Image (cartoon, coloured by chain):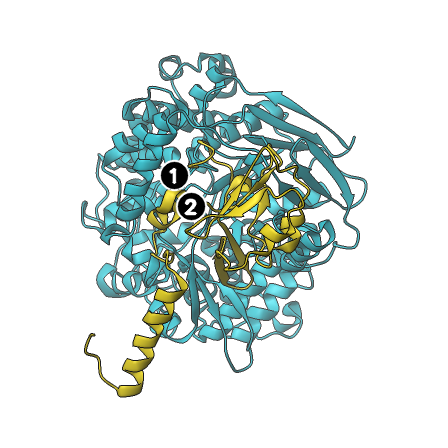
Amino acid sequence: MPYGFMGRILYIDVTERSYKTIPLDEGFIKKWLGATGIGIKLLMDYQEPRIDPFHPCNPLVFTVGPFVGTMVPCSSRYGVFAKSPLSNLLGEAYSAGFWCLEFKRAGYDALVVKGKADRPLYLYIEDDTVHFLDASHLWGKTTWETEDTIRRELGDHEVRVASIGPAGENLVRFACIMNDRYRAAGRTGLGAVMGSKNIKAIAVRGTGAVEVAEPKTLQEKCLELYHRLQGPATTKYRTLGTSANILVLNTAAALPTRNYREAMFDGALQVSGETLNEMFVAKIQACPSCPMRCEHVAEVKDGKFKGTTVRVEYESLWALGPYCGVRELDAVIKAIELCDLYGMDAISTGVVIGFVMECFSRGLISREDTGGVALEFGNSEALLTMIEQIAFRENLGSILAEGVKRASEKISGSIDFAMHVKGVEMTGYDVRGLKTAALGYAVSRRGAHHQTHGAYSFDLSGKVDRFKAERGRGKLVAESEDIYIVYDSLPLCKFTRAAWKGLEEIAYIYNLVTGFQFSAADLLKSAERISNLARIYNMREGLTWMDDTLPPRVMKDPIPEGLAKGSKVAPEELRMLILDYYEARGWDSKGVPRPSKLLELGIEEYIPLISYIAR
Amino acid sequence: MKHENRFSSVASRIRSVRLYPYRNVALTCVLCENPPCVKACPRDALTQAQDGHIVVDEDKCVGCGLCIEACDFGVIMLHPLRMVAIVCDLCDGSPLCIDACPEDALTLTSRDIRAQIKRVEVAKKLTGGSSEG
């Protein structure tokens, strides 16, 4: 077995309450690199095509990469994969923290969970043993209570727990999986898949070790990196944190506000990272192996929400603040805490509530529908009430729990301002004035998301003209996606990205860990293979080129004010960008990978499948 | 890492503990002046070296765990594979954890020096001055 890997997949069938391990061979690892590739490949192999995401046979896959459990900085991350209940396509989310370390030290690189338990249970993975434990006493409990209770009843403080809250149990389509209290595998609704299997939590404890090829050299290299990662390239994360984006994007008129009606928020200062740090941040702490620190834990010290204590990042702050027009920061912090406790993706939650606030303002729904709540933009009480209603599927919450796409199909006249791509809610960048990012969102393999490509950075840094759609952006996005796949696979936190001396340095560390001889080009080749596999998976599940698109509002309604005033992504601009992207990827004009490309990438076994689907 | 040549936090001689909502602390042997672990060992496997660290005679140690019972800090532990007591040995006088800590949160100091530093600090505070010496 190559160094850096444990060489085993743990396969659990919760219907049968049985488990086995499956060896992972070196050829497979070299082909699929780490967490992302192995995750998508296992999903491809273990899932029957086109099943319903809530079918017991939808595999819930957890993966770690070779860097997990070593002293490589910022590597404590894991991926989760399943068919997404939001998009009916690839479900993919990442989380950080301690859980992945225990899981890997228990001796596994991946976990595949299939089946459906006859009653609520939680899994306890203790090195080679898997316990199937009753969770009826945990059902209905919040993620934090669940974690605390499991640690207490197993009598082991070092047990780490990934769990779902009431939202996952109630199959809220954007429910997430929470671990180590504040960390979420947030996007694409994987908590609902876990809930559909009647699994409340997965507790792990591992006592094994991770061996690397060149321990001494790696140690020296890591000490050097620890110091570099304390330098200027990462200052943002341990000072203002990601929440600095509120004012940055507001100035750029790229802060989606009130359901994308505006791109600047008149209350931006009140909910800014600056205000957050000054008034609420009690501690900035780190994940294991991270010398940077980004986790801003905010604590409300007085007032109505006294005692609320939760990690705050830009995306959750934006979604539940500006996007819903809410400017009371303590209420936004409370809203974030509720999302964590109930186990819901705070991004999707905010976008869904912003959407329904617009429905309310247009009279498409009435107070009768909302159970008497005045769902106006900026009403923080309404925000908190709706979070409760969604998590427990009460009143209007039962429609909203289906996600913005399905909700817009039920509320007539709302489709034009339902902000999602492929059923997955938009994130905090107004792509009308960020045209490289717009392309990234349109083609992203897991629906609307900024962290599959990070293309907003080209736009905001001025490397390209952000208001212009032109050829060449396709190549930028494709390359950027592949680099991000390398980060997610190894894994490395993307917040390190400004600190590296090129991808060569990352390849060097990959080799110190694994003993392989990968060049930067080899890493990118593997990433391109993974991108293509994700495309093939999505096509198998029913994706066509028509799904590579943006919400109607992005194409119709220009940004009304500020630096980006007048900007939108016209349909013909988007079409041109997408064709440019397909070309850069070696795909045909319908977005289908060409056989020659699959042959080049060594995944020619999928050529028959692709030609069958294309017909 | 130094002792194991691989990454195994359950064999680590310094441990970090995170308490919710946001307390973090690193714990390792505090080099007691009159170490109860040494006294507790029925086989005299533990001795204290000149610099204060605890030396474990692995031939004598049978992994009974009485030293763990005796330690108030939970910083003497059993090795997960060898099942003998392990404890911080100060890495031959130059602890690697100090080099690795990115926040410079760790220092190696004696009680005398620590008290001295504190006296200087409090003297500054009491006199309102900031001059050195």
Q: Residue A293, position in %: x, y?
A: 38, 55
Q: Name the residue: 28% across, 62% down.
A: A248
N-terminal of the pair, mark 2 or mark 1, is: 1
Examine the rendering and report whether any part of residue A112 can be seen. Answer: yes
* Residue marked by disc 2: A289
**Do callouts 2 and 1 mark residues in contact (Cβ within 8 Å)?**
yes
A93 left or right of A588 in image: right
- Nearer-the-camera pick, A512 or A595: A512
Read off the chain for label 2.
Answer: A
Residue B62, image x, y percentages? 66, 37
Colour assigned to chain A in the rendering is cyan
Question: Is any part of residue A49 visible from this angle?
Answer: no
Element class at badge 1: loop
Marks 2 and 1 sit apart, C-alpha to C-alpha, by: 7 Å
Q: Which chain hosts label 1? A: A
Find disc 1 in the rendering and name its residue.
Answer: A72
Q: Residue at x 55, y 69 (%)?
A: A383
Dot 2 amino acid type? Ser
Residue nearer the viewer, A87 or A272? A272
Q: Residues within 10 Å of mark 2 (few under 14, many from 20)?
A: many
Residue A75 image-quadrant placement: top left
**Chain given the colour yellow:** B
Q: Secondary structure at mark 2?
A: loop
**Against A604, is A225 above or below?**
below
Pointer 1 local density, CA inside 10 Å: few below 14, some 14–19, many at least 20 = many
* Vertical side of A96 occupied by B22: above or below: below
Q: Quadrant of the C terminus of chain B?
A: bottom left
